[in-house]
Amino acid sequence: MGGDQDTNDLFTALSAAQFTNPHMLKRLQDEYSNIQNKIENDELNPVRSTIVRLAIDGLWFAEMFGLALPNEELKQKIIEELKTYIKENE
């Protein structure tokens, strides 16, 4: 088994623990609230920043559960496009 698969398995196990343990889930929810608060209060457009955060969350979710993963080249292009998108019309 490759290192990427081992990492994905670890993320999946950790996520399962977080979603089935109310205390761990609350900590994750609090952390995401903190991240979102920072996004909404920095100098960048909060709508664009939130869209990018949700897209990155989706990439992470797809990687974690092996759901229609883009290849590495496409993933890097997506990330670069998101970086460009977030800075448009600043």
Image (cartoon, helix red, strand yellow):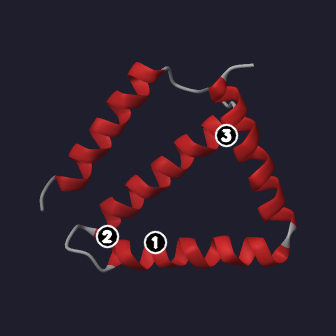
Above or below, 27 relative to 74: below
Residue 64 is labelled as: 3
Q: Which amino acid does label 1 sit on?
A: Ile
- Determine crowd level at label 1: few under 14, some 14-19, many 20+ residues with C-alpha closer than 10 A: few
Badge nearest the viewer, 2 or 1? 1
Disc 3/disc 2 C-alpha distance (Å): 26 Å
**Who's the residue at 76% across and 72% down the image?**
24
The location of residue 20, given as percent across then percent down, is 87, 64
Residue 35 is labelled as: 1
The location of residue 66, given as percent across then percent down, is 69, 30
**Who's the residue at 21% across and 44% down the image?**
84
Q: Mark 3: which secondary structure?
A: helix
Say which residue label 2 marks.
46
- The quadrant of the rendering that contains the N terminus is top right
Q: What residue type is labelled 3?
A: Met
Q: Relative to the observer, which residue lies in front, 22 or 3?
A: 3
The earlier-in-sequence mark between 3 and 2 is 2
